Amino acid sequence: MKSPRAPIARGAPSFIFFRSRYSTDANVASLFDKYVDRTNVHSWNSVIAELARGGDSVEALRAFASMRRASLKPNRSTFPCAIKSCSALLDLFSGKQAHQQALKFGYEPDLFVSSALIDMYSKCGDLGDARKVFDVIPQKNVVSWTSMIAGYVQNDEGREALSLFKDFLVEERERGGDAEVFVDSVAMTSVLSACSHASNEVTTKGVHGFVVKRGFYGVLGVGNALMDAYAKCGKVATSRKVFDEMTEKDDFSWNSMIAVYAQNGHAVEALQLFAQMIKDGDSDYNAVTLSAALLACACSGALRVGKCIHDQVMKMDLEDNVIVGTSIIDMYCKCGRVEMARRAFDRMRDKNVRTWTTMIAGYGMHGRAREALEVFYEMIRTGVRPNYVTFVSVLAACSHAGLVDEAWHWFSSMLREYNIEPGIEHYGCIVDLLGRAGYVNKAYELIKGMKVKPDFVIWGSLLGACRTHNNVELAEISASKLFELDPDNCGYYVLLCNIYADAERWEDMERIRAIMNSRGLVKTPGYSLVELKGRVHMFLVGDKGHPQHEKIYEYLEKIYVKLKQAGYLPNITSVVHDVEHEEKEITLQIHSEKLAVAFGIMNSAPGTVIQVIKNLRVCTDCHTVIKLISKIFNREIVVRDAKRFHHFRNGLCSCGDYW
DNA sequence: TACACAAGCG
């Protein structure tokens, strides 16, 4: 599949300009077989337009340069195509040259030329110049307004875009009856895109109402944009409602809805919809569909489906699409198959910064920091510039493996060598690393010296470290910050209770429990997923909804008998409940990952790897139990928790009990 | 001859 835009990075120095790179016309010559007269402006216009329409922007600009060398005077039809080609190449330098020429020949106020200029400046990230062109248009039309609104949206200025839309409505009213300035469906698509960027439900609903009032609701592009806008403010069900109400469907709509589900954690729905799209057969799936479906597989650990999609990618010859390729690597990493991810990674010809970062993050989440660092060094050697997320991945990899020195090195050199200011996520990794390595006070000092305001992730890491290293004093400081920042999250109250319990400070524990109860805080329900024969099964804590639940509980009982014979003692501090010891033990038994592991062993052949995905972090007791199960049942068990992978084999875990 | 909507990394 052809990349939608030429691979010239935004803001990169312009290396293409008319007089050098665009000045050979050998390839243009063949087109003159069709348009014979080289002295005719219209022939040149046709050539430039045809090349631009065909997506060959470099050739279009070469033709434009040749035309100028032939001393032919461009007319108003020449410029929009030439400027659009600069826009497609994100070539601001050439775009400015084209603008100068348009000025020289007096075409700047032309509506077609000015709209193309606004589009070009916006896409090249130069909003200031786009706005200057917009402001001097004497009689703006709907395209001028839409181009400028779209320009703000493309540059992440959603609020400005919406504000300009209000101005547009004022002008529409003032020039009442002038067909040139009526809001149309394309304008509404841009406005809805602005709503997506602003992620504001009230605004989206307001624009939705406007869309219905003006009769644009049935327009395909408008419906697609509306679905996206609702999804971005978290209204997945409303997004689906819009999808269901659309009478016309196209590939865009299906792809949007599948992506909405996948990006919002509704992996099962995403894969169901993908299956329905194939079954219906009215729309063809493409690279976009497949990468969205791969994301759903990655989130839910659906390895078998992911592999099928990978086969399909190969059949459709889409392996060279960098986004699809990156999605495949991500899917294999998150489904526990880091070696397969590496093979796919090695086969990819075009790798961009996201591809490299995905591989680094993949090794990191499996605790394989050395390999993550090797990939990172290779990336730098290849000349790919690491970005903000790359450093998060590098530091996270060090953090998962406890590599304090390496993490410090990259944390301190990211600004100096790569001009990337450490952000909250980088600090989060370092605090986590220092805290878990036992340097709890050093982590606290780092937090106090942070340029950015510490968030709940930072304080949460410190609180977790305080639990591991029994530091009650710092735990109380961290917890008080967390209760301010994230008052409804019950996890921190539970953690503090556990810390008090470890220190046998029962009265303090009771006090926190009372606060939890008075605020009506409920624990985030834990769930685990396990894929069996291509179907993903979900288990909640103490789940009794699964068709096999009675058999699973019976089997779990048998497992516990064997565990106790092997010397297992439940770690009761993993649960904070005011109940008798025996009851606490029962609560532990029904953690969702235990149900999922039992279900996996029951339903698969001996020797098969069991893989479980959990939404929360695995607790100490489950970690101990699964280690023992891996030994007693001679099974490899892979658990992906909210933070990382654990590979259990022969009674040991790949995390080395460090997580 | 112009303007819009869908995919990947923490």
Image (cartoon, coloured by chain):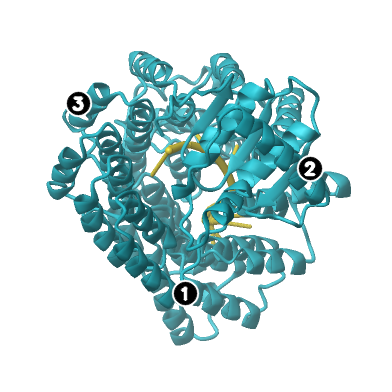
Spot occupied by residue A530 in the image (x, y as percentages of width and height): 69, 39
Q: Tell me what hue chain A is rendered in.
A: cyan
Q: Which chain letter matches label 3?
A: A
What kind of element bears circle 1?
Answer: loop
Q: Is residue A16 left or right of residue A365?
A: left
Q: Is residue A228 left or right of residue A424?
A: right
Q: Which chain letter matches label 2?
A: A
The disc label shown at residue A417, or none: 3
Q: Tell me what hue chain B is rendered in.
A: yellow
Read off the residue under disc 1. A520
What kind of element bears circle 3?
Answer: helix
Read off the residue under disc 2. A284
In this view, the residue in front, A38 or A645, is A645
Say whether disc 3 or disc 2 marks the residue closer to the N-terminus: 2
Q: Same chain for marks 3 and 1?
A: yes
Q: Say which residue appears at 24% left-offset and 53% top-offset.
A: A454
What kind of element bears circle 2?
Answer: loop
The disc label shown at residue A464, or none: none
Q: Same chain for marks 2 and 1?
A: yes
In this view, the residue in front, A531 or A261, is A531
* Neighbourhood count class around disc 3 (C-alpha, 10 Å): few under 14, some 14–19, many 20 upward: few
Q: Say which residue appears at 72% left-offset and 28% top-offset.
A: A307
Say whether disc 2 or disc 1 marks the residue closer to the N-terminus: 2
- Whole-angstrom CA distance, mark 3 to mark 1, is 49 Å
* Neighbourhood count class around disc 1 (C-alpha, 10 Å): few under 14, some 14–19, many 20 upward: few
Vertical comparison of A513 with A426: above or below: below
- Whole-angstrom CA distance, mark 2 to mark 1, is 49 Å
Type of the residue with mark 2? Asp
Q: Quadrant of residue A31?
A: top right
Type of the residue with mark 3? Glu
In this view, the residue in front, A617 or A341, is A617
